[in-house]
Amino acid sequence: MTDDPDDERFFREQMSGVRKLSTDRAPLARPRPKPDARFARDEKEQVLRDSLTGEPGIDAEAEVSFCRPGVTRSVLRKLRRGKYSINAELDLHGLNVSQAKHAVDDFIAECRNQDYRCVRIVHGKGTRSGRDGPVLKPRVYRWLRRRDAVLAYTTAHRSDGGSGALYVLLR
């Protein structure tokens, strides 16, 4: 500081309303939410088995259903009959496998954030996929099984896409 009394007086006036902070540490940001585990240990082992054995061919018209342990048959039956209202829809037509995987992951995460219970995913029948059969269809089934947020899924009604779409029930 300078020896000028006016400077010191000015400084004291400017600092008159200032209080000492109780701590010198910056406030902490809110903790980030825990990441959503993509799949559990058993599912990782299933991925390994799938990668070694390859994917069985799936018929373009095949109907499927899946439910986690603890999901009752009546819930799966209601899902299959379309008794739950559809909160959102994802259409994978025109996407390659990598784009579709990201789209499904992002869609499920967003639906969970919105607390949606039932959604529809349109993967297509794969009728133009050549002699090896559908490409996205079996992968979508596998991706959904790996997501803990997915309680069940089943083939949609013909009016909602039939064997080219799924009703998906979320936690």
Image (tube, helix red, strand yellow):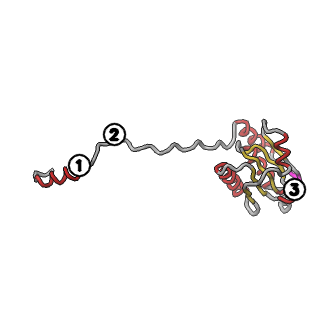
* On-image quarter of the C terminus: top right
What crowding class fits label 2: few (fewer than 14 Cα within 10 Å), some (14-19), or many (20 or more)? Answer: few
Callout count: 3
User: What are the residue bounds of the magenta stretch?
Assistant: 57-62
Helix, strand, or loop for circle 2?
Answer: loop
User: Residue 64 location in percent, x, y?
Assistant: 85, 48
The answer to if 60 sits in the magenta stretch is yes
The first of marks 3 and 1 along the sequence is 1
The first of marks 2 and 1 along the sequence is 1
What crowding class fits label 3: few (fewer than 14 Cα within 10 Å), some (14-19), or many (20 or more)? Answer: some
The label shown at residue 22 is 2
The amino acid pointed to by label 1 is: Ser
User: Residue 85 location in percent, x, y?
Assistant: 77, 53
Give the residue pinned by disc 1: 16
User: Residue 101 location in percent, x, y?
Assistant: 70, 53
State the separation of the CA atoms marked 3 and 2.
68 Å
User: Residue 129 location in percent, x, y?
Assistant: 83, 60
Q: Judge by depth and name the residue closer to the eye, 12 or 154.
A: 12
Q: Judge by depth and name the residue closer to the eye, 49 or 153.
A: 153
Q: Nearer the viewer, mark 3 or mark 1?
A: 1
The amino acid pointed to by label 2 is: Ser
Callouts 3 and 2 close, C-beta under 8 Å: no
**Residue at screen point 23% across, 50% down:** 15
Residue 123 falls in image quadrant: bottom right
